Amino acid sequence: MSSGQINPFSNMNNSTGKNIILTGPPRSGTTLSCFLLNQLPNTIALHEPMNLGMFQSQEQGLEETQQFFAAMRQSLLTEGKALSKVKAGAIPSNPFGKAEQGKRASLVRKDWVHFDKPLEQDFTLVIKQNAHFTFLLEPLNLLYPLYTIIRNPVSTIASWNTIQAPVSKGNLTVLKGLRPALFEELERIPDLLDRQVRLLHELFLPYRLLQKEQIIRYEDIVESNGAALNHLVPNTPGIQYTLENKNRNALYDASLRTEITRRLMQFKGAYMDFYNPEDFDW
């Protein structure tokens, strides 16, 4: 963080409450983090509640984010409900189903979810959007406390290849509004893995602006049974939830993992600022 930047934690105790941005590359553990944060008192974490249409430009995305925080705080305080992607009326730990035939499908849909917990006026509200917030990270980092969840790059791309989602094709629809030139550039890369590696590099690039305490590894979340997230919401009982590391998921084809590793090492993208080459060696 440069000396001229505003401290991203400066509004942590403002009069409207504690609004926190959570982001990270898709399939890095951000949904799991929302699930865990929702176990804490006086805390709500929303999983991708905003619409793609809210991010037709960077200016619109920033304005819509500020308005959305205010609207969800008001709704939660007055009606105890907020918008989020949910499964069976609750925010799950994993939004994708099992791989029964082909790639895993999403099990969540956007809906109003009721939270059966008391909330004080200054409750902590976490909103998670992946690429939407990552590609707006620099201005958002000046407005809100902001955290990113990252995961082993090999596992991240391996997971992309098991799901039904735009990222499995090596691009993201939200880039049409936030980074149209990048969207078109990715579209011109003929090889799928090359597109995915380039996309992961672009997702990691903004994280170079963050302080160390703003970056949380999926691996640390799992190893600590969620406690790695506790500093997002201090002065609470803390998270302790038995977790399993999915980096070596049996769904991740061994030959594909090997090829992903080779491409990552060949490209040498921004992800290498956060994970060492030995982390890729499976």
Image: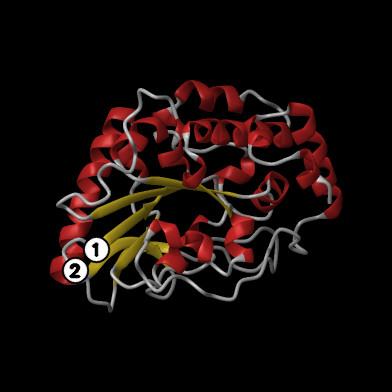
Q: Quadrant of the N terminus?
A: top left
Which label belongs to residue 4? none
Mark 1 closeness class: few <14, some 14–19, many ≥20 residues within 10 Å: many
The answer to whether 206 is drawn above or below residue 184 in the figure is below
Q: Say what amino acid the circle numbered 1 marks.
A: Phe
SS of the residue at dot 2? loop
Tell whether label 2 touches label 1 (CB within 8 Å): yes
Asked if residue 208 can be seen in this view, the reply is yes
Asked if residue 95 can be seen in this view, the reply is no
- Which sits in the foreground, 194 or 102? 194
Q: Which residue is mark 1?
A: 123
Q: Which residue is mark 2?
A: 120
- Which sits in the foreground, 110 or 23? 23
Could you tell me which residue is drawn at 64 percent across and 34 percent down? 273
Horizontally, residue 140 falls left or right of residue 173, namely left
Could you tell me which residue is drawn at 68 percent across and 48 percent down? 152
Could you tell me which residue is drawn at 78 percent across and 33 percent down? 265
The answer to whether 35 is drawn above or below residue 181 in the figure is below
Could you tell me which residue is drawn at 70 percent across and 27 percent down? 190
Mark 2 closeness class: few <14, some 14–19, many ≥20 residues within 10 Å: few
- Which sits in the foreground, 75 or 169? 75
Marks 1/2: CA–CA distance = 5 Å
Q: Where residue 163 sits in the image (x, y, percent)? A: 63, 55
Q: Where residue 170 sits in the image (x, y, percent)? A: 62, 38
Q: Say what amino acid the circle numbered 2 marks.
A: Glu
- Which sits in the foreground, 149 or 164? 149
Horizontally, residue 177 falls left or right of residue 112, namely right
Q: Where residue 202 sits in the image (x, y, percent)? A: 57, 31
Q: Where residue 83 sits in the image (x, y, percent)? A: 29, 61
